Every structure is written in structure tokens, then in C-alpha cells.
Image (cartoon, coloured by chain):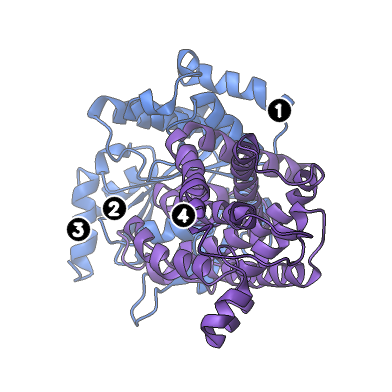
Chain colours: A purple, B blue
């Protein structure tokens, strides 16, 4: 048991150290949502009227509306970047080092995901702090109740990233990930506009967005920021996490997974 | 005496017909330096991938310290230290941080680890580099850090996959000597994959791999006298030619 805890601690510690050393990554992780918040949201404030809807009990500004969506965006990018770092790691071989530790493979991959979620949490905390400095705040308790929601959403997005990392070979494929994963997940969600708005445009798009796991992550975070629990969204996110984890464990399983086939081109 | 590593009737294919390894069998004894010799494409990296859990074999078994790698992976992996062909250090972390991470990953406590790290840094003449980022180290030093990392948990078996790739001649000789000393001083069983015949000494054991099959095993000295050749390279040529598969 102690061995598991020590390994988990080591993996999280390394991920945090690496994150702190990559200052550019931290800055871009912060600048991205801040640009959206202060430029995009300011421009769209007039264009998008927001009606009163839970968890809000009054009319809100557009900035208030997009805050949870942007927090989720931070996690989304972090999850995809961790996946890239896994592709990179595997090329560098340190994923192989991880997998030669005398612990179950599933546990090691979980530890890696959890470490990524903790790094995501730190990024969101910095983002929310800067937003708060500019006067964009949520109820004080919300900053605590949102932590489990952020960790769960971070795990889910990390699991998606891990699944991708087992199928992507080259670093250049980040452009593909942007086009086929990040953009659809983000725009087909409730991050930037309420779903009823989207429904006015197209019933199909509404349905896609409704079942998009990222929408549910956004809503989970939105309600948690106001000390409330969106059970349906939590169920969706938890279910999606389990599904993506199962698939990525399968993908990283040497007996059946994708790695042997892909390694076929290797030397020796 | 129980072998540190036993490979029996190992077979593996990447699909698409053909095989990468077939009927591979050999043993690595404690305190012995056993070289896995083969040209590029012989199947060395595949075999290393199977030993380090990257793939699982289609056929046959791998026992490390008597533990079946498939049935008891935890115990088997605990008995083994690995130096990979590709560099696997975090360049932006210090030497000490890299070692601490690896120790934690293996479930070792900070209390157990600290003196062991000091001892290994000292042994590999890295003490004054402990707080340097790995990025600042040259290739030879980086390899020594990886060697120290593989030995943190005092494994009875040390596996090295073409560890001298990219090293200059002096660092290469230095590493070969260091690892040979591990066999004699600490009775560590070493399994060293290479395509460079000059890394193997006359007293070592070899496993000659060619096109996915083992062509010969045993003491280098015996192999030379059996084939009536002066060098390992000539012996290899003779064996391969005798089978009619150049």
C-alpha cells in the first residue's frame, strides 16, 4: 500500500516540477482563457443576451457566464497537452520507465492522469485568481466546492488525451487534435453560449452539444462554482471518464493494445 | 544456482505474417556479463521490449529472479533494473531529482533512498553534479545517471539496451568497464544488448541472435575455440554463413 502512495506522490511531484520548469506552457495556459475572457467576451457581451437560468439567480454578465467554460477550456488544453507529453515521453522513453515500475499498469496510468489533473487544477486556480482580481468572482465557498469538479473533469479530459496519445505517433499531430478534438468539443458545448441559444440555430447541433462530455464537464464546474451539484452532469462526466479510461487501458495493454502494431516499424 | 533471467521458447510477431522472434531460449546467471549480440534488425529491440513489458510474448515465458513476468509482473519487475536505449531522463530536472523520482516510482521511501542515492552518486563519480540539471551533462554522464537509477533498488538483474549508442570512445569504454565491475564486485547479472563485438570480453557469455533466432550461446572463449576463429566477429560470420542465411 505504501508503495502505491509513494509512487503516486513521485508521479505528481515530477509532473508539478516539469510544469514549473515549463514557464512558457504556464503562461500560455493562462493567457489563452484570459484573452477569451477580456477580449472575446467583451466583444460578445452585446451580441448575446443571457436569460436567468440555474445556477444563477439573477441576470448575469457574459463574462460571468463564460468563466466556468473557460476554466474547463484550461483543463481541455491541459489534458491534450499531457497527451502530447505522453507521446513525447514515449518517444523519450520515460513512459517506458513508468511502465517498468513493479506496480500494476492501470495504477501507473491512473497516477499519471491524476498528476495531470492536479497540474490542471493549479492552472485553473491561477486563472480564477486573476479573474477575481479584476472583480469577476463567485461565492467564496464556490472556490472550494469546485475543486472536486475540476479534478473529475481533469481526469476525464486526461483520459481522452491518453487515449489519443496511444493512437497518435507524431508531435505534429497536435494540429489534428486541435481541429478534430479541441474545437468541436469546445464550440459544441455550453462553454460559450447556453444550449438553448444553440437550439435556436439547429436541433441537431443542440443534441450533439447536449451529449458532448465536455458540455457536461462545463456544467458540472458551473454549478460547483456556485456550491451546487448538477447530478446529471456529474453522472455523465463520471461515466465518460470510466469509458475513456477503459479504452486507454486497453490501448496501453501490451497483449491486445495498439503499441505492438505501431512499434512494428522500429529497429532491431 | 537459480538463473537471474530465464527465457524459454519465446516467440513474438508483429502480425502481418512473419515473426520477429521464434523459439528464443537462454539463461543469464548471477554475476555474469551476458551480451545479446546481433546486427540491426536481428530482433534485439523486440526482445528488450518483451523483457520490459512493452509487449507481451505470443509464445513462451520469461522468468526474472524465478518470477514469471506474465503471472507475477510485480515481483519480476522488482528484481530488474533497466537502462533503455533511448534517453529517459528529465532534462530539466536535476540528477538528484531524477533519481528521487525513480525511487518513488519503485515505491522506495525517502529514508531508504537518500543514503542509497548518495552511495551511487559517489560510486559513479557524480556527487558534484547532483544538483545540476541533466541538460547540462554530457552523454557519458547522462548514461551513468541512468545506470545509477537502474541500480537504486539493488536489482539482481540489470538489463541494458544498446547503452553505448551516441557515446564517444572513452565514455563507451568507461561504461563497459563499470558494468563489468558490477558483475564481479556486486554479483549483479547483466544482460547487455549490442551490435558492437568489441564491447564483449573473452570471459563473458553471449547470446547470438540472428533474424529472430538464437544461433549460439555460451562463453565467448568456448565459442571461439569451437569455431576455430580468433574474434567474435569472425565466429558470428561463420555461424551465420553455416546456416545459409547471410
Which dot, 2 or 3, sits closer to the camera? 3
- Residue A43 has which mark? 4
State the residue position of label 3. B238
SS category of the residue bearing label 4: helix
Residue at 40%, 32% (x, y): give it: B143
State the image quarter where residue B151 is shown: top right
Q: Chain of mark 3?
A: B
State the residue position of label 2. B226
Inter-mark Cα distance, 2 to 3:
11 Å
State the residue position of label 1. B110
Which dot, 4 or 2, sits closer to the camera? 4
Inter-mark Cα distance, 3 to 4:
78 Å
Q: Chain of mark 1?
A: B
Inter-mark Cα distance, 4 to 2:
84 Å
Between B46 and B211, the one lying in front of the other is B46
**Quarter in which the C terminus of chain A is drawn:** bottom left
Classify mark 2: residues with Cα within 10 Å, few (<14), some (14-19) or many (20+): few
Return the residue found at the far bottom.
A203
SS category of the residue bearing label 1: helix
SS category of the residue bearing label 3: helix
Q: Chain of mark 4?
A: A
Q: Position of residue A108 (x, y in %)?
A: 64, 53
Between B64 and B98, the one lying in front of the other is B98
Q: Position of residue B201 (x, y in %)?
A: 33, 36
Instruction: Note whether residue B67 is visible.
Output: no
Q: Chain of mark 2?
A: B
Residues tagged 4 and 2 counted as in contact (Cβ below 8 A): no
Q: Is residue B138 above or below residue B64?
A: above
Residues tagged 1 and 3 counted as in contact (Cβ below 8 A): no
Amino acid at each position: 500500500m505504501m508503495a502505491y502512495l509513494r509512487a503516486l506522490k513521485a508521479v505528481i511531484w515530477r509532473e508539478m516540477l516539469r510544469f514549473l520548469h515549463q514557464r512558457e506552457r504556464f503562461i500560455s495556459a493562462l493567457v489563452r482563457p484570459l484573452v477569451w475572457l477580456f477580449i472575446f467576451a467583451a466583444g460578445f457581451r452585446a451580441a448575446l443576451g443571457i436569460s436567468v437560468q440555474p445556477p444563477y439567480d439573477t441576470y448575469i454578465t457574459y463574462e460571468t457566464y463564460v468563466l466556468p467554460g473557460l476554466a474547463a477550456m484550461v483543463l481541455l488544453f491541459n489534458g491534450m497537452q499531457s497527451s502530447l507529453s505522453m507521446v513525447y515521453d514515449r518517444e523519450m522513453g520515460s513512459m517506458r520507465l513508468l511502465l517498468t515500475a513493479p506496480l500494476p499498469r492501470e495504477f501507473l496510468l491512473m497516477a499519471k492522469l491524476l498528476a495531470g489533473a492536479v497540474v490542471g487544477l493549479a492552472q485553473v486556480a491561477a486563472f480564477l485568481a486573476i479573474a477575481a482580481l479584476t472583480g469577476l468572482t463567485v461565492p467564496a465557498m464556490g472556490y472550494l466546492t469546485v475543486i472536486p469538479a475540476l479534478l473529475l473533469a481533469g481526469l476525464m479530459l486526461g483520459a481522452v488525451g491518453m487515449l489519443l496519445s496511444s493512437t497518435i505517433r507524431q508531435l505534429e499531430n497536435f494540429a489534428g487534435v486541435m481541429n478534430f478534438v479541441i474545437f468541436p468539443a469546445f464550440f459544441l458545448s455550453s462553454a460559450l453560449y447556453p444550449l438553448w441559444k444553440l437550439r435556436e440555430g439547429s436541433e441537431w447541433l443542440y443534441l450533439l452539444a447536449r451529449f458532448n462530455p465536455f458540455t457536461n464537464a462545463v456544467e458540472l464546474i458551473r454549478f460547483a462554482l456556485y456550491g451546487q451539484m448538477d447530478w446529471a452532469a456529474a453522472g455523465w462526466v463520471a461515466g465518460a471518464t470510466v469509458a475513456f479510461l477503459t479504452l486507454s487501458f486497453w490501448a496501453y495493454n501490451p497483449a491486445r493494445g495498439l503499441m505492438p502494431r505501431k512499434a512494428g516499424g522500429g529497429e532491431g | 544456482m537459480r538463473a537471474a533471467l530465464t527465457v524459454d521458447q519465446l516467440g513474438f510477431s508483429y502480425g502481418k505474417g512473419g515473426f520477429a522472434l521464434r523459439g528464443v531460449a537462454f539463461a543469464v546467471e548471477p554475476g555474469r556479463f551476458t551480451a545479446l549480440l546481433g546486427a540491426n534488425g536481428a530482433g534485439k529491440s523486440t526482445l528488450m521490449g518483451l523483457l520490459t513489458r512493452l509487449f507481451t510474448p505470443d509464445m513462451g515465458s520469461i522468468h526474472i529472479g524465478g518470477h514469471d513476468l506474465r503471472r507475477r509482473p510485480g515481483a519480476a519487475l522488482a528484481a530488474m533494473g533497466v537502462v533503455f536505449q533511448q534517453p529517459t531522463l528529465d532534462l530539466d530536472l536535476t540528477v538528484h531529482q531524477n533519481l528521487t523520482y525513480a525511487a518513488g516510482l519503485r515505491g522506495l521511501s525517502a529514508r531508504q533512498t537518500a543514503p542509497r542515492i548518495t552511495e551511487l552518486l559517489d560510486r559513479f563519480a557524480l556527487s558534484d553534479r547532483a544538483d545540476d540539471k541533466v541538460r547540462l551533462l554530457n552523454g557519458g554522464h547522462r548514461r551513468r545517471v541512468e545506470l545509477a537509477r537502474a541500480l537504486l533498488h539493488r536489482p539482481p538483474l540489470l538489463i541494458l539496451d544498446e547503452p553505448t549508442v551516441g557515446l564517444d570512445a572513452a565514455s563507451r569504454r568507461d561504461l563497459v568497464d563499470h558494468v563489468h565491475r558490477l558483475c564481479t564486485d556486486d554479483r549483479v547479472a547483466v544482460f547487455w544488448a549490442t551490435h558492437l563485438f568489441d564491447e564483449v570480453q573473452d570471459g563473458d557469455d553471449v547470446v547470438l541472435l540472428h533474424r529472430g533466432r538464437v544461433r549460439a550461446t555460451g562463453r565467448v572463449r568456448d565459442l571461439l575455440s569451437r569455431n576455430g576463429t580468433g574474434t567474435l566477429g569472425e565466429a558470428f560470420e561463420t555461424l551465420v554463413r553455416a546456416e545459409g542465411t547471410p
